[in-house]
Image (cartoon, helix red, strand yellow):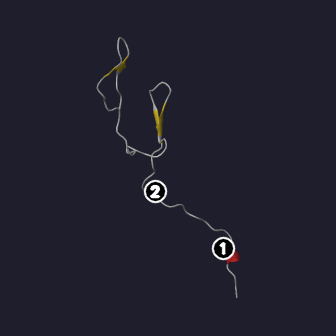
Amino acid sequence: MAVPVTTDPTFMVGKATTLFRTTLPAVAQGSTYDAARDGQRFLMAVPVVNTTPPITTVLNWPSLIRSK
């Protein structure tokens, strides 16, 4: 959200407007986003969804098998 603010002659807050929509939760522990110093860009930690599990390759696996 963005809100216009004026301070002269008195502090006044204008109407809030939506800047963009995101899938981030409204209330999250810790900071999941940050704004650039100039206020023109945002960096967000967005959870990865629909990922496939990693593939594990075991080399020389016969040496791991014990014979009794």
Q: Left of 55 or right of it: where is 6?
A: left
Query: How many callouts does the rendering have?
Result: 2
Q: In this view of the protein, which residue sits in the foreground, 34 or 64?
A: 34
Dot 2, crowdedness within 10 Å: few (<14), some or many (≥20)? few
Give x and y (percent) for residue 68: 70, 88
Q: Which amino acid does label 1 sit on?
A: Trp
Q: In this view of the protein, which residue sits in the foreground, 28 or 21?
A: 28
Q: In this view of the protein, which residue sits in the foreground, 30 or 46?
A: 30
Check disc 1 and report the residue beneath it. Answer: 61
User: Callout 1: helix, strand or loop?
Assistant: helix
Check disc 2 and report the residue beneath it. Answer: 51
Quarter assignment of residue 18 = top left
Q: What residue type is labelled 2?
A: Thr
Q: Left of 33 or right of it: where is 64?
A: right
Q: In this view of the protein, which residue sits in the foreground, 46 or 56?
A: 46
Compared to residue 68, the image places residue 8 above or below, namely above
